[in-house]
Image (cartoon, rainbow, N blue to C red):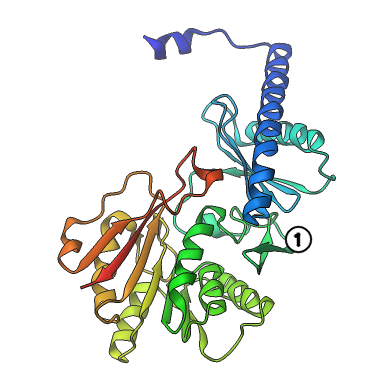
Amino acid sequence: MRARAQRERPELSAEERAAQVEAQAEMLVNRVRKNRKHRKKWAKREGVSCYRLYDRDIPEVPMSIDDYEGRLYASLASQRELSDEEADALGARWLEAVRVALEVPEGHAYLKLRKRQKGSAQYSRVDRAEERFEVNEAGLRFWVNLSDYLDTGLFLDHRLTREMVANEAKGKRFLNLFAYTGSFTVYAAAAGALSTTTVDSTPTYLRWAADNLALNELSAPHHELVRSDVGLYLDKARGEGAQFDLVVLDPPTFSNSKGAPTFDVRRHHAQLFEQLCRVMPRGGVLYFSNNARTFKLDDGLKRRWLIEELTDKTTPLDFSQRRAHRCWRCVLK
């Protein structure tokens, strides 16, 4: 009955639609102001300079907004009832209202429309503004780019996970798989890892990881960057007798990147765990995370691994309203 009622609901006139958008913008501004008042205090107390301001709090405004040291990054999912052009215009109006209310300078607010992506499309370039700048996290520096890609280069929801990894990294042989821009590697290297190996199939992000290491004066021969499919790399590492004491595995939900086997985290994570058994000693620690909406850890993994879910412990306050990831700490028996 509800679906039928929605179909029969009369279309709004242009004037009515414009008034609706302005009312939504006002609701958004009020909520963002309220969130910012509380989160600025929390961020200052915790030493956090980049955080989420708004996360689809209001159903009528399905947008997320992050503050990157005074610059705003907003993400809006494509709307079924709107064309991409209309959704983009709607998001731009909402974001402009927030920018003005928070007195953010013009040119320091960025909007990305998230369409349904296939393969590695989520990582492809959408602009060439090259507006890269540095941000701070836990005393470390990272390059972010709010203009050119759908993701910024630093996943804010994993800041607590990065701290946990750093707390275990001293003296360890560290491996970062599906490494993206290498933020976990920077944490591990800064914490005194004996060596780090950073694996990703995308050259753009490996260069970005190298730049992040250099930014923190951590470039060295024992911090290796490897362009490879993760499964192929693990086979090669096993053949060479490589061993890793501490591993981060944070794969995409799905990927069919050119030149690499198709990957689906739901179907293929157990295979990666099995490959990792061959390059880790007993007692080796694996941090496994993903952001698949529906995910069930393979029950057979418990035969080889001691597994503890850490999702609640790795979810920061600014992401507590809407879970951004799930995370497990796994110890090889």
The C terminus lies in which quarter of the figure? bottom left
Q: Position of residue 270 (x, y in %)?
A: 24, 63
Q: Is 170 rendered above or below residue 113?
A: below
Q: Quadrant of residue 305?
A: bottom left
Q: Position of residue 306 (x, y in %)?
A: 23, 65
Q: Position of residue 187 (x, y in %)?
A: 54, 72
Q: Is 12 rendered above or below residue 302?
A: above
- Judging from the image, what secondary structure is the residue with disc 1 in? loop
The N terminus lies in which quarter of the figure? top left
Q: Quadrant of residue 125?
A: bottom right
Q: Position of residue 19 (x, y in %)?
A: 72, 15
Question: What's the residue at 70%, 26% (across, down)?
Answer: 30
- Residue 111 visible, this orientation: no
Hey, which residue is sitting farthest front in the picture? 45
Q: Is 104 rendered above or below residue 243?
A: above
Name the residue type under label 1.
Glu
Looking at the picture, tell me which residue is in the foreground, 291 or 206.
Answer: 291
Left or right of 260 on screen, residue 65: right
Q: Is 90 rendered above or below residue 261?
A: above
Left or right of 305 on screen, residue 182: right
Question: What's the residue at 35%, 80% (across, down)?
Answer: 245
Looking at the picture, tell me which residue is in the foreground, 119 or 193.
Answer: 193
Question: What's the residue at 68%, 60% (across, down)?
Answer: 145
Looking at the picture, tell me which residue is in the foreground, 47 or 282.
Answer: 47
Q: Which residue is mark 1?
A: 131
Q: Quadrant of residue 183?
A: bottom right
